[in-house]
Image (spheres, grey):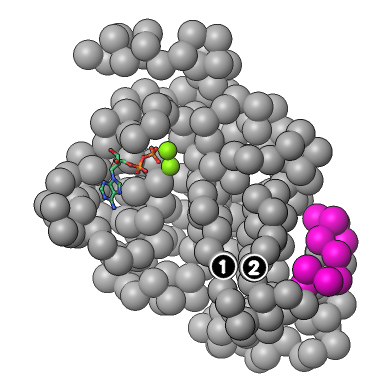
């Protein structure tokens, strides 16, 4: 579903290289996790894949279901089925949450050559999904993420993801700043979306989230590269011993 080969990317302004040859393949139906020390380039990887400005890809490739992601504009990537839940969800003043969701859903459907979702069906779906995530009606009316708590923003990201039905979901530290109950809601929301034709990349600092979203594969990222890959046990090893042993072993 997502294939990244030898991806190198630098900060456009300073020219500083952050991604130094990332190789990663996420198959449809699988959940891959990326863990790694602060500053290793995890968020940069998600930004570069999403098409956020400010980065220059200097080498390598990234494809989504075989299509060249790096050749697409950010909106085209989303329309092609890539979804990113950011570490810091953006607030959008003046745009109602419901309106935003409806526009995004219909843009997605249009890109897939499908008809718009009618208003009644949309309302029914959004309400049902919001209820599962304990997002109340009032939050659906407010401007996107404006004045939402950290936990509410993260749950709202999962609502967007549930409505968009993407092919490939990337979650960047969706667990950070969440209390145990909110994390459980987010994890349940993600698990409900697991499907044989959808891939997940879950970026997290802590094993905790991976107790709830059990990954098929765990990668460790450090200094702009994936330095080790293993099963769920690798996350437990990190939880017990930190990254020092793995970094030393690779060095
Ligand atoms: P992680 O998500 O793994 O903690 P990041 O991708 O956020 O790591 O950052 C990787 C490295 O790139 C860090 O050293 C960070 O300071 C640097 N970096 C990322 N974005 C910028 C930026 N816009 N300006 C300066 N340095 C940046
Ligand atoms: Mg960080
Ligand atoms: Mg980060």
Say whether residue 68 is left or right of residue 17.
right
Quadrant in which ligand 1 is drawn: top left
Residue at the disc numbered 1: 91
Magenta stretch in the rendered image? 131-140
Instruction: Find out whether residue 209 is within the magenta segment.
Output: no
Q: With respect to residue 43, does 224 lie above or below? A: above
Precedes in sequence: disc 1 or disc 2: 1
Residue at the disc numbered 2: 146
> Which residue is at 12% across, 52% downward?
15
Spatial CA span between label 1 and label 2: 5 Å
Residue 133, given in percent of the width and then of the height, sits at: 80, 55
Residue 145, given in percent of the width and then of the height, sits at: 64, 66
Query: Front-most of 37 and 4?
Result: 37
> Which residue is at 65% across, 33% downward?
209
Residue 93, given in percent of the width and then of the height, sits at: 58, 77
SS label for mark 2: loop
For the residues bearing labels 1 and 2, Cβ distance under 8 angstroms: yes
SS label for mark 1: loop
Quarter of image, res 128: bottom right
């Amino acid at each position: 579903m997502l294939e990244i080969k030898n991806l190198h990317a630098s900060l456009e302004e300073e020219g500083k290289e952050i991604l130094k040859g990332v190789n990663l393949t996420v198959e449809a139906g699988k959940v891959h996790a990326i863990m790694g020390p602060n500053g290793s380039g995890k968020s940069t990887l998600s930004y570069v894949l999403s098409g956020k400005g400010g980065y220059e890809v200097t080498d390598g490739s990234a494809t989504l279901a075989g299509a060249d992601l790096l050749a697409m504009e950010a909106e085209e990537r989303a329309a092609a089925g890539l979804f990113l839940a950011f570490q810091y969800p953006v607030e959008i003043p003046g745009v109602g949450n419901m309106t935003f969701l409806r526009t995004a859903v219909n843009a997605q459907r249009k890109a897939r050559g499908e008809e718009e979702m009618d208003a009644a069906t949309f309302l029914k779906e959004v309400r049902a999904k919001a209820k599962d995530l304990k997002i109340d009606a009032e939050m659906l009316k407010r401007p996107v993420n404006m004045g939402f708590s950290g936990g509410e923003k993260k749950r709202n990201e999962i609502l967007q993801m549930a409505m968009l039905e993407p092919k490939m979901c990337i979650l960047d530290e969706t667990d950070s700043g969440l209390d145990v109950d909110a994390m459980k809601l987010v994890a349940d929301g993600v698990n409900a979306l697991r499907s044989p034709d959808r891939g997940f990349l879950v970026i997290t600092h802590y094993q905790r989230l991976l107790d709830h979203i059990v990954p098929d594969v765990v990668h460790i990222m450090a200094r702009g590269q994936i330095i080790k890959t293993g099963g769920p046990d690798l996350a437990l090893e990190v939880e017990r011993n930190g990254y020092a042993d793995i970094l030393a072993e690779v060095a």
